[in-house]
Image (cartoon, rainbow, N blue to C red):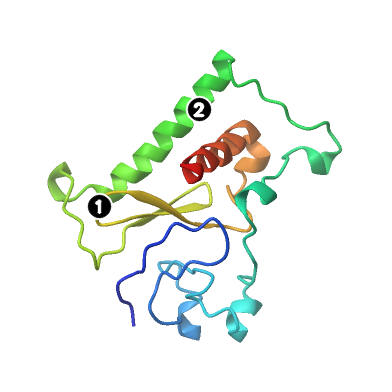
C-alpha cells in the first residue's frame, strides 16, 4: 500500500505522502500521517473525522493570535533581545527536529534512501527530508501549533516567519 513519495516544495494546495489513498480503517491509526490528498478527501470517513480542509497560501493565512479577543494587532520588535532569544529557540527546535529525523543508529547521520520517508512535525508544520538531506515543508495543519498559538503567540508567529523566509528562497 505504501510506496516512495514524490517530493516537491509546495506553498499551496495538497501534498501526497502515499502512492495510494488510505483505506477507511487507516483513519483511526495515529501512527499514520493523514495527508490531505493521500487520505482521499472524498472518503466518507475523511470528512466525518474532520480532515476535510484546504490549506491556503501561507501569506494569506498567517493569523493574528490576538484578533479574536479584539486586541490590537500583535507587534513584535525584531531587534529586541527577547525576540532574538525567541528566534534562537525556534531555530534550535527546527534544527533539532531535522537532526532527530536524520539520525541513524549509533548517533550518526545515516544515508537516506530515495524510497524512505523521513517526516516530522513541529508545531503543526510537517517537514519531510529528501534523499539529499534537505528539509521541505510538506503540510500545514488547519490549526497549526496545537495550543501554542494561544499559549505562546510570539513563538507561533516566529515559526510562521521562519517558514515564510525559507519558502521565499
Mark 2 — residue?
87
Residue at x-position 34% and y-position 45%: 98
Give 67 or 30, whichever is nearer the viewer.
Answer: 67
Residue 149: give x, y in percent of width and height: 64, 42
Name the residue beneath numbered marker 1. Answer: 132
Q: Secondary structure at mark 2?
A: helix
Please name whichever residue, 70 or 61, is drawn nearer the observer in this view of the structure. Answer: 61
Sooner in the amino-acid sequence: mark 1 or mark 2:
2
Q: CA distance from mark 1 to mark 2?
A: 26 Å
Q: Position of residue 137 (x, y in %)?
A: 45, 52
Q: Residue at x 45, y 67 (%)?
A: 30
Assess disc 1: are there few (<14), some (14-19) or many (≥20) residues with their C-alpha within 10 Å of its C-alpha.
few
Residue 5 position within the rendered picture, expressed as x and y whole percent measured from the top left: 34, 69
The answer to which quarter of the image holds residue 115 is bottom left
Coordinates of residue 59 in the picture (x, y in percent): 64, 47
Closest to the observer, 105 or 79: 79
Amino acid at each position: 500500500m505504501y510506496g516512495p513519495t514524490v517530493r516537491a516544495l509546495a506553498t499551496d494546495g495538497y501534498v501526497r505522502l502515499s502512492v495510494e489513498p488510505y483505506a477507511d480503517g487507516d483513519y483511526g491509526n495515529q501512527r499514520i500521517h493523514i495527508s490531505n490528498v493521500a487520505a482521499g478527501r472524498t472518503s466518507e470517513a475523511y470528512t466525518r473525522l474532520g480532515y476535510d480542509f484546504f490549506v491556503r497560501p501561507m501569506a494569506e493565512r498567517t493569523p493574528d493570535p490576538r484578533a479574536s479577543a479584539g486586541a490590537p494587532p500583535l507587534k513584535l520588535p525584531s531587534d529586541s533581545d527577547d525576540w532574538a532569544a525567541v528566534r534562537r529557540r525556534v531555530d534550535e527546535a527546527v534544527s533539532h527536529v531535522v537532526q532527530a529525523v536524520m539520525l541513524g543508529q549509533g548517533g550518526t547521520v545515516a544515508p537516506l534512501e530515495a524510497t524512505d520517508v523521513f517526516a516530522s512535525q513541529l508545531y503543526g508544520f510537517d517537514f519531510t527530508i529528501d534523499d539529499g538531506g534537505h528539509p521541505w515543508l510538506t503540510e500545514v495543519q488547519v490549526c497549526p501549533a496545537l495550543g501554542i498559538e494561544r499559549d505562546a503567540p510570539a513563538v507561533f508567529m516566529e515559526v510562521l516567519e521562519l517558514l515564510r523566509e525559507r519558502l521565499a528562497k
